[in-house]
Structure formats: structure tokens, C-alpha cells
Amino acid sequence: MWKRKSEERRNERPGAPLPAGMFLAVLGLAMMGFGICRGEMAVVMEKAVNICMECIGIG
Amino acid sequence: MDKKKQNDEWKRHGAQALWAFLTNSYLSGFAQGKIYKGKLKNLCVPGLNCYSCPGALGACPIGALQAVIGSWNFKFAFYAAGFLMFTGALCGRFVCGWLCPFGFVQDLLHKIPFPKKIRVFRGERLLRKLKYVIFAVFVLLLPLFLVDIIGQGQPYFCKLICPAGTLEGGIPLVLLNQSMRSALGWLYAWKMALLAMTVFLSVVIYRPFCKYICPLGAVYSVFNPVSVFRYRVDKTACIGCGICADVCRMQVDPAKNANHPECIRCGACKKACPVGAIR
């Protein structure tokens, strides 16, 4: 019932982005920022600039 | 499929090829058997693109997620998870249809003629749930809990399953490096077998890896129904002819749910609709 109503509402405003989508996108950006602040990017970088032996099937 | 629809599909393949080239354009890596080590590797790319591909300029988000979860000092990957959430909430599985190099490879493989292409089979719907299990077990739980003495976990999905890593990184690097060739063992053989199976199945079934295995597709599929950019069906214009469901190779019925978790937004339904009800 609730799902059908929200689908109808979406069809009434076909061009409008969903608030949930916008909220999750902003939350994702905030999480990225938090992750960068606590130094996760360095871990990603270290893994990505060295050949990943597990990925290629050797290690 | 008529000529116009084929041309439209090749336009999408052109976009996929361009994106795959842009994100894998470190060409000297292919010549020297080395990988790019510049600062762009800090950034994740949206598709499944192994960072050990000699041409790769960015980091694979699934690899990045496992790397951080499995590191001794972090137990959650806010950066990679935030990236997946942001990308998913923005465009959902549009990434699978347009921006994933391994999806592109499967698209091309499926064009190879085969006597009996399979659309659906018994248990197919259930098998689609497997990708969520793989994401939970191999991407999250094993790197988090199956750790060594200093608390470091391995990227188990990359190590035991990912055929994209074998294709994009394993084959070129092993071909170009004598030292790596001498280090090959059972793991490489296992991964090559998985890749061979994926290649064969991709000829017979449309995108089997995306449908049943890919953890990245699993994550993006969760965001498909709420993503900012998504399909809309004009119910007043829809005549219920079912053509959109017939042309969908991911077995979605857009008239019922245009933003189904399995929809990769390839646009086939949109182009096939005789009344332009899908926007």
C-alpha cells in the first residue's frame, strides 16, 4: 500500500530526484570525507601501487 | 533485432570502450609489464577494474574495500563504502551497463554465436541472490575475521574468485614477467579455470558474472530503486504490450518495476518501447 503510493507520487513528479537518493549520495560523500580524514586513502594507495599478488592469482 | 537497435547498442559499447580506455590508459605499463604508481591510484573507479591491470589509473572499489577492512588498523572502510554509496545513490547499476570494463567484455562475448543461448533456467532467480552472499562472505566477513597474527586479512574475493583480476592483471603481467611465470601455482590455475568458465558462460548466458557473482553489482543493485538518475514509466502512456520485458536480457519487466535491482540501465527497453513510455 505504502509502496504503491510512493510509486504514484514518483510518477506525478517524473523529473524530481528521490529524497532518499539525494540523502544517500550526500551521506556517501560524508563517509568518503571521513575515511579520507582518518587516513584510509593511504591504505588504498599502498595496495593499488604495488602489484596485488592475490588479485593476479600468485600470492 | 533490427539495424537501428543494433546501432544503438554499439553506441553503448562505444561509450563502454571509451571509459575502459580512459581508466586503463597507462599504455607503457603494458609494454613494460609494470603497473601505474601515480597519485590517481588514490581514487576509486566505479566499475570492476583490477588495480593490478598494467594500464589501470585508478583503484578497484571492491579491492579498496577489502584492503582497508583487512588492514590491521582499520576495521571499516568509510572511504570505499562511501564511494560505493555515493555512486550507487547517484546512478545505481548504470555503472554495470556503461562503466564496467568486465561488463563490456561479457557484452562482447555474448555476441559470439552459439547454438542455444540460455535466457532463464530452473533456479535462476535464486542463483541471483548468490552475489549478495559473495559480497557478505568474501568481501566483508573473511577479510575482517580471517586474519593473520598481526590482524591483517586478505582480499579473499580478489584472491579466490575475481576473474576480472585474472583477465586484466594476471594474464598480461604473467606474460610480460619471467619471474612471475616461475611463481605460478594452483591458485593461478584455479583462477584461470574460473575465468575460462566465465568466458564460456558469457557466450551462452547474458552477463553471468554480473547476474550471479559480482559483489559490486550486488552493492549497486541495492541503490537502484532510489538512485537519483533512474528510469520512469509513464503509466498513462504504457499500453502493456510487454515488448520492454521481451528485450530485457537481465530478465526485468520495466513496466512493473523500471528500477528493479537487476536493471543495468542498458537502455534496450527504452529504445524498444513503441509509445516512448519509459524515460
Image (tube, coloured by chain):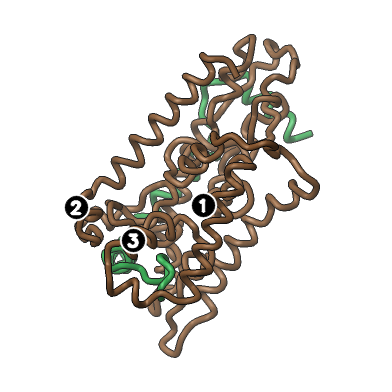
Chain colours: A green, B brown
Packing grade of label 3 (10 A; few <14, some 14-19, many >=20) is many
Label 3 and label 1 in one chain: yes
Vertical comparison of A47 with B259: above or below: below
What type is the residue that disc 3 sits on? Ser
Vertical comparison of A19 with B61: above or below: above
SS at mark 1? helix
Pointer 2 or 1: first along the chain = 2
Horizontal and vertical percent for residue B85? 48, 49
Q: Residue at x 42, y 24 (%)?
A: B11
Quadrant where the image shows the C terminus of chain B: top right
Packing grade of label 2 (10 A; few <14, some 14-19, many >=20) is few
Pointer 3 or 1: first along the chain = 3
What type is the residue that disc 2 sits on? Ser
Q: Nearer the viewer, mark 2 or mark 3?
A: 2
Horizontal and vertical percent for residue B155? 46, 70
Residue carrying label 1 = B216
Q: Which residue is drawn at 42% across and 62% down?
A: B63
What type is the residue that disc 1 sits on? Leu
SS at mark 2? helix
Q: Which of B237 and B153 is in front in this view?
A: B153
Horizontal and vertical percent for residue B101? 42, 44
Camera sees residue A52: yes
Q: Nearer the viewer, residue B271 or B10?
A: B10
In space, the residues marked 3 and 1 are separated at their CA atoms by 17 Å
Residue carrying label 2 = B28
Pointer 2 or 3: first along the chain = 2
> Dot 2 falls on which chain?
B
In space, the residues marked 2 and 1 are separated at their CA atoms by 28 Å
Camera sees residue B92: no
